[in-house]
Image (cartoon, grey):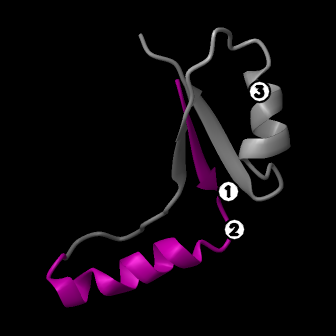
Amino acid sequence: MRVLIRPKEGILDAQGKAVETALPALGFEGIREVRVGRIVELEADSTERLEELCEKLLANPLIEDYEIVTPA
């Protein structure tokens, strides 16, 4: 399974802003907003405490949103 972690809306995303600023200089036009997050991949027997794991370790719930993606 994967946990997708992104900065919350309204939180400064310095890395995303740096990528966004560099795009036109590299010839990439028409991209209006870039947000950079991270993916944490886990192999686990159960998802029972995954929310707790995200809240306590993987994400900072004050400034980040996360989404748990389980394989279909």
Spatial CA span between label 2 and label 1: 6 Å
Q: Nearer the viewer, residue 36 or 39?
A: 39
Sequence-first disc among 3 and 1? 1
Q: Residue placed at 45% from the left, 82% from the top?
A: 18
User: Are there few (<14), some (14-19), or many (20+) residues within 10 Å of tag 2?
Assistant: few
Q: Residue placed at 76% from the left, 59% from the top?
A: 63
Q: Secondary structure at mark 3?
A: helix
Q: Please give the label number shown on residue 51.
A: 3
Circle 2: residue type? Ile
Q: Is residue 65 above or below residue 21?
A: above
Q: Nearer the viewer, residue 52 or 10?
A: 52
Residue assigned mark 1: 8
Spatial CA span between label 3 and label 2: 22 Å
Q: Residue placed at 64% from the left, 9% from the top?
A: 45
Q: Is residue 25 left or right of residue 71?
A: left
**Residues rendered magenta in the picture:** 1-28
**Quadrant containing the C terminus in the rendered view:** top left
User: Are there few (<14), some (14-19), or many (20+) residues within 10 Å of tag 1?
Assistant: some
